[in-house]
Amino acid sequence: MMDKKKASKGTGEKETSSTGEYNGESVEENESKNAEEVKESEEIKGHVKDEEKDKTIEDIKSSDTETTDETVDFSDFLPNNMEQVLKLSLFQIQPWAYIYLGLNLHPKENKVVKDVRQAKMAVDAASALVEVLMPHVTDAEQKELKVLITDMRMNFISKSREG
C-alpha cells in the first residue's frame, strides 16, 4: 500500500507518495513539466519586453516624424526694454563673481576655481551695470541693487585677502 502525504500549495491540495510520485506523476515527469512551464513563462516575459521595446522605438520614430502646425512663441521670455536687458546681464554676471571667488563650484570644472582677476572683472562689470540702472529703477529696486553690489564687493575683499 502506498504511503500518501498531503501537501498544500496555493489553493489546491497536492498528494505526494513515498515512491516519489506527485499527483500521479513521477519526479522526472514533474521536473520536466516544471522546466517547460518555466521556459514558457520566460518566453512570454521576453515577448512582452520585446513588444515594449518595439512600441517605444515606434513611439520615438513617430514623434520624430510628426510635424505640428503649432509654433512656439518665445517672445514672452525676451526682455521688453534695456532696463530688463541690463538686469538680466547683472544676474548672469553675479554668480560668476562668486564662482571665481571660490564660493561656488565652477560648472565646467565641477570644482572650486579661485581666480581673483576674473572675480574682479565680474564685480566691476556688475557695478557698472548697477550705476547705469540706478536712475531708471524704483527706490525698492535701488535698495536691492545696492545690497547686491555691496555683498559682491565685501565677498571680493574678504576672499582676495585670503590669498
Image (spheres, rainbow, N blue to C red):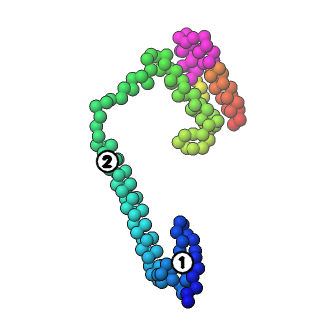
Q: Which residues are magenta?
A: 125-146
The quadrant in which residue 100 appears is: top right
Gap between marks 2 and 1, in whole Å? 54 Å
Q: Secondary structure at mark 1?
A: strand
Give the position of the C terminus as an image quadrant. Answer: top right
Q: Is residue 103 above or below residue 1?
A: above
| Mark linked to residue 54 | none
- Of all residues, the one furthest to the front in this rendering is 1
Residue 68, placed above or below residue 77: below
Q: Earlier in the sequence, mark 2 or mark 1?
A: 1
Label 2, residues with CA under 10 Å away: few <14, some 14-19, many ≥20: few
Task: Residue 60: give x, y in percent of width and height.
Answer: 35, 47
Magenta stretch encompasses residue 140: yes
Q: Identify which residue is drawn at 66% across, 24% down.
A: 151
Residue 81 counted in the magenta span: no
Camera-side residue of 80 and 34: 34
Q: Report the residue at 62% width, 22% height from top.
A: 148
> Of the residues shown, which amino acid type is indicated by label 1?
Glu
Q: Is residue 72 left or right of residue 144?
A: left
Quadrant housing residue 157: top right
- Name the spot of residue 75 as percent of width and height, x first: 39, 23
Q: Which mark is residue 15?
A: 1
Residue tagged 2: 61
Front-most of 119 and 25? 25
**On the picture, is 112 further left or further right than 136?**
right
Vertical relation: 112 (above or below) 136: below
Give coordinates of residue 9: x percent, y percent: 55, 69
Tell me if I can see residue 133 in this picture: yes
